[in-house]
Amino acid sequence: LPDPSKVKKDMTKVVDRLIAHFKSIRGSEPTPELFDNITVNAYGEKTPLAGVAQVVIQTPTLAHVTCFDPSVALDVRKAIMEKLDLNPELEESGNLKVILPRISME
């Protein structure tokens, strides 16, 4: 029989990954967790988006991404485009506006 402590440890990992996956699914209202799985090629290495920018959901169809360092704004834009298949607008201030599509009945 398998060791119960090892089985419990393995099952905890599975549940943690499932919870992380559920956070990335968009329901009727978008949340900043929608952007949690994005990594940005900034400063020569992959960095989580939360390490280089702050995401604020302003309306159900608009997210505002504020880059801590405006020089990485293009890298953040590229990462959002690749991961979420969205087209963020780069503002002159180095921040991004991300238009979020409305959820359909499908």
Image (cartoon, rainbow, N blue to C red):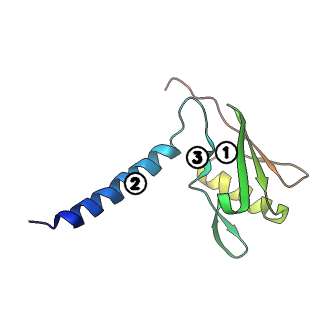
Residue type, label 3: Glu
Q: Nearer the viewer, mark 1 or mark 2?
A: 2
**Quick one: label 3, few (<14), some, or many (20+) residues within 10 Å?**
some
Residue name at image x 58 percent, y 29 percent = 103
Taking the view exactly as shown, the residue that stands out farthest to the right is 92
Structural distance between the alpha carbons of marks 2 and 3 = 15 Å
The numbered dot on residue 16 is: 2
Taking the view exactly as shown, the residue that stands out farthest to the front is 5
Q: Is residue 37 above or below residue 61?
A: below
Residue type, label 1: Leu
Residue type, label 2: Asp
Q: Residue 59: percent from the left, percent from the top?
A: 72, 31
Q: Residue 3: percent from the left, percent from the top?
A: 16, 67
Q: Residue 52: percent from the left, percent from the top?
A: 72, 62
**Quick one: label 2, few (<14), some, or many (20+) residues within 10 Å?**
few
Taking the view exactly as shown, the residue that stands out farthest to the top is 105
Structural distance between the alpha carbons of marks 1 and 2 = 27 Å
Residue name at image x 52 percent, y 46 percent = 24
Q: Dot 1 corresponds to which residue?
A: 86
Q: Count the marks: how many?
A: 3
The tag earlier along the polypeptide, 2 or 3, is: 2
Residue name at image x 90 percent, y 53 percent = 93
Q: Secondary structure at mark 2?
A: helix
Asked if marks 1 and 2 touch (Cβ < 8 Å), the reply is no
Q: Secondary structure at mark 3?
A: helix
Q: Dot 3 corresponds to which residue?
A: 33
